[in-house]
Amino acid sequence: MMIERIKLTELSTGLTGFTAGVHIFAARLKSSANDARDQHAAALKTLDGRLAAAVAEKRAAETSAEQLDQRLAQEGDCIASLNDKIQTAERVCSTLPAEIQSMKDSLDRDTNDLRRREAALANQESIQESKLRAMRQAVDLYRGRLGLDFRKEEADELLLVFTHLDPCDHQREFHLGVHVEADNVYTVTRCSPALEGLSTHVDELNQRDDFRSFVRKVRRLFQALAEPAGERYQH
């Protein structure tokens, strides 16, 4: 019986040691498992952060892609509009040479017409000036001998003033106003006193352009009008 008790004691001691070893191994295994779990949790947390960052980057990339598509669409519309404008400008430019030549031809015609008008106007002015000069020369010629003077009271009008016609009043004035029209035609602007048959002499003046002869005829008409009735009868 003593031998069996010793064996049981040894067996109990061995079992206690084995149990202690099992506990130690279990504790180590648990510790390792906890470390592995912590590491796994940390790794999962890191992966979650990377995944969230990747999702954010994907969303940002998708937003950028949408904005880029919108910009490309807008730029495409802008390019199409610019192409239309370029084509329109090219069509306009293709017609410009003919239009410019037409404008140049029209300008040349207008310039030539203006030059012709200026030349005609200068010629008319020269003719009018010549006639006025001839009228003044005729007046100067007869001023001293015929008591004839002239006054320029209105624009382009020569007023002939005759004196020494009335035997009763040598200073009595007889007036005849003459004007040269734009078509180089003489017209009478006034006549005091009025003379009969004056229009006939004006027609002859415009036909022959002899102002001196016209002045002499007008003087004779005034002189006949100023003479007393008896003297007119004798003439």
Image (cartoon, helix red, strand yellow):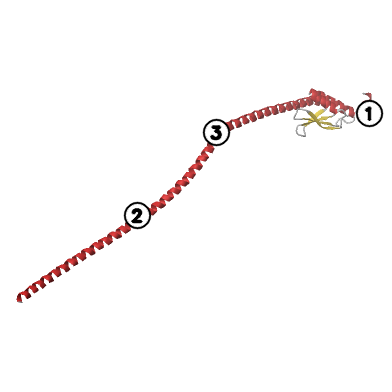
Going by the numbered disc 1, the residue's amino acid type is Ala
For mark 3, does the 10 Å Cα neighbourhood hold few (<14), some (14 to 19), or many (20 or more) residues?
A: few
Q: Quadrant of the N terminus?
A: bottom left
> Which residue matches tag 3?
94
Which of labels 1 and 3 is toward the front?
Answer: 3
Q: Quadrant of residue 123?
A: top right
Going by the numbered disc 2, the residue's amino acid type is Ala
* Disc 1/disc 3 C-alpha distance (Å): 89 Å
> Which residue matches tag 2?
54
For mark 1, does the 10 Å Cα neighbourhood hold few (<14), some (14 to 19), or many (20 or more) residues?
A: few
Q: Is residue 26 visible?
A: yes
Q: Quadrant of residue 127?
A: top right
The label on residue 2 is none
Q: Nearer the viewer, residue 113 or 144?
A: 113
Q: Earlier in the sequence, mark 1 or mark 3?
A: 3
> Which residue matches tag 1?
229
Left or right of 19? Residue 60 is: right
Residue positioned 46% across, 46% down in the render? 73
* Disc 3/disc 2 C-alpha distance (Å): 58 Å
Q: Nearer the viewer, residue 105 or 25?
A: 25
Going by the numbered disc 3, the residue's amino acid type is Ser
Please provide percent x and percent y for residue 179: 78, 30
* Disc 2/disc 1 C-alpha distance (Å): 137 Å
